[in-house]
Amino acid sequence: MSKGKQRDTSMDDASPSGRTEDELALARVVYVGHVPHGFFEKQMLGYFSQFGKVTRLRLSRSKKTGNAKGYAFLEFQYPEVARVAAEAMDGYFLFKQRLKCKLIPPSRVHPQLFQGANRRFKVIPWRRVERQRHDRERTPTEHAQRVAKLVRKDKQRQKKIKEAGIDFEYEGLHKPMQPKKIVFE
């Protein structure tokens, strides 16, 4: 027996991508790429349901804006249905976009791939949330900290003006300010 490395013969019947036909025969998850704008979860579920029962669907979206990223993952109830759907829809033109559909073998499916799937997307009004955070009423300690910071910055500004040799005097922020509360009726 030779002392060299032994060759693994289990992958001899694998395709060039390293996947065996047995692995693809069990694949239930389909990757859909180049998804056009306007073809969202509801439309995708309705369209792909013509092939068979779609158990889970996840359209990837941006966390910041909520816009679709252009790809999705579908899980069908049966592997045969997933194979037919992937073959039928690969290269299909939809809204001037050519779809890419590929089967994903079970070994390549991440356990958290469908985290947050089958949930209706809810737009978060970030501007309103930030406006409410900014406009909320401050506690007395928060107000005191803000005023102290303003006074400290103003003293630094006056010091820089003097060091630059500029003879400029203005009324600084020496005394504590009271918070202004304006109510519009």
Image (cartoon, rainbow, N blue to C red):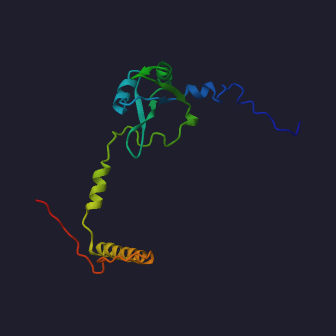
| Residue 161 coordinates in the image, percent (x, y) | 40, 74
Closer to the camera, 120 or 28?
120
The quadrant of the rendering that contains the C terminus is bottom left
> As displayed, is residue 43 above or below residue 151?
above
| Residue 157 coordinates in the image, percent (x, y) | 39, 73
Residue at 57%, 27% in the rendered image? 24
| Residue 164 coordinates in the image, percent (x, y) | 44, 74
Would you identify the image quadrant in which residue 117 lies?
Answer: top left
Residue at 36%, 74% in the rendered image? 154
The quadrant of the rendering that contains the N terminus is top right
Residue at 38%, 44% in the rendered image? 65
Quick one: which residue is furthest to the bottom in this view? 175
| Residue 87 coordinates in the image, percent (x, y) | 50, 20
Total numbered labels = 0
Closer to the camera, 130 or 14?
130
Q: Is residue 183 left or right of residue 134?
A: left
Q: Is residue 54 left or right of residue 182?
A: right
> As displayed, is residue 18 above or below residue 162?
above
Would you identify the image quadrant in which residue 23 lies?
Answer: top right
Closer to the camera, 101 or 10?
101
Q: Is residue 106 left or right of residue 117?
A: right
> As displayed, is residue 46 above or below residue 123?
above
